[in-house]
Image (cartoon, helix red, strand yellow):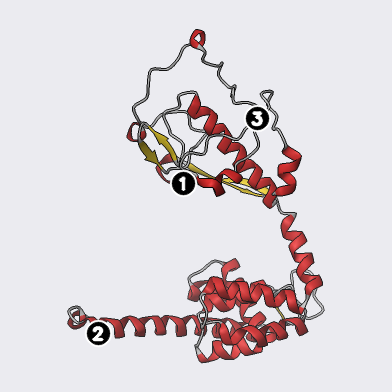
Amino acid sequence: MEAALGDSRTLTDLAADVENDARIAGCRKLLVAAAWADAHSAVDHPDGGLLVERLVPIGPVGCPAVAEFAAQGLVGPFDASTPSVRSWMADALTIRHRLPRLWERVVAGDVHHWKARQIATLTAHLSLAAAADVDAHTTPWVEQLPWPTFLKALDATMLQVDESTYRERERLAAAKREVRATPSEAGLRTLIARGEAGDVTMMMALYQRVAECLAEEGDEDPLAGADVEGDRDHREPCPTDRSPCPARRRPRSAPRTVGEGRRPPGRCDRPVGRRPPTSGLGERRARQLPPAWDGRGGVVGLSRFRRSA
């Protein structure tokens, strides 16, 4: 290792060897998980009973059942939790029994384990015949295409193979709406919202309009893409943060008083139905701007905006 530090060619070969070893190690881990499941595919009392270990399914249709507490034996060797080990076993069985061509590549160490596991998860809802068909069409391209491109090809193949199941899965995914907050750096929190595309587009448009109104009120955080005293700032505005940041301040004229024509807080006096200024945004961005406030807390043309979204 130390002798290769000054030689670029040797370092390149070393990096390729390390990547190849990591790929093979991941495949071997899947093989061990499958063999462990095979070794625990029977119990002493198959009929069950009180305080007796049972056989339970851990994978989709076509995968054999495994002893209920089999995963606990690999917690130490895998240095992972019981749910994580059970997930390894389920993915290994899914690939072996539902995706035979992909399993051949896993045995040969030709694919990254995380790619094989993700394919197993994405195809778990398919029938055995449909999964085998998808496996035959997509497995040769797992390591040939960039991963995002392959996922698109996999999605298109699943739609072509079994459209009814694909539509049902799409309907179930659309019904999963949620809003949650996760911890972030510097004492901040990240807000994650999941919903229909039209609803999310409308929410972002409303936030954009609120940010524009705050900028007209004299907010210290300028709009993204808007000219401020001859300077241009490309950061997205945050209407939920009213506190000015000294690092982003720009010189502004003295604020107006109410007697001098300044509108009351919370009101945007832009004419109803008129698009906001589009300096620096371009004609295409101008056509994407949200509808205007009606001055009473509502939005003009909301139904039309929903349809277009």
In which image quadrant can residue 149 be found?
A: bottom right
The crowding category of the residue bearing disc 3, from other C-alpha atoms within 10 Å (few below 14, some 14 to 19, many at least 20), is many
Q: Is residue 210 visible?
A: yes
Residue type (three-letter) at the residue carrying disc 1: Ser
Return the disc, 3 or 1, that comes first in the chain's sequence: 1
Say if 197 sits above or below 32 in the image: above
Can you name the residue that lies furthest to the front here? 283
Could you tell me which residue is drawn at 62 percent across and 37 percent down?
206
Check disc 1 and report the residue beneath it: 184
Residue type (three-letter) at the residue carrying disc 3: Trp
Check disc 2 and report the residue beneath it: 9
Could you tell me which residue is drawn at 71 percent across and 48 percent down?
308
Residue type (three-letter) at the residue carrying disc 2: Arg
Q: CA distance from mark 2 to mark 3?
A: 62 Å
The crowding category of the residue bearing disc 2, from other C-alpha atoms within 10 Å (few below 14, some 14 to 19, many at least 20), is few
Please state which of residues 146 and 67 is positioned toward the viewer in this rendering: 146
Q: Is residue 69 visible?
A: no
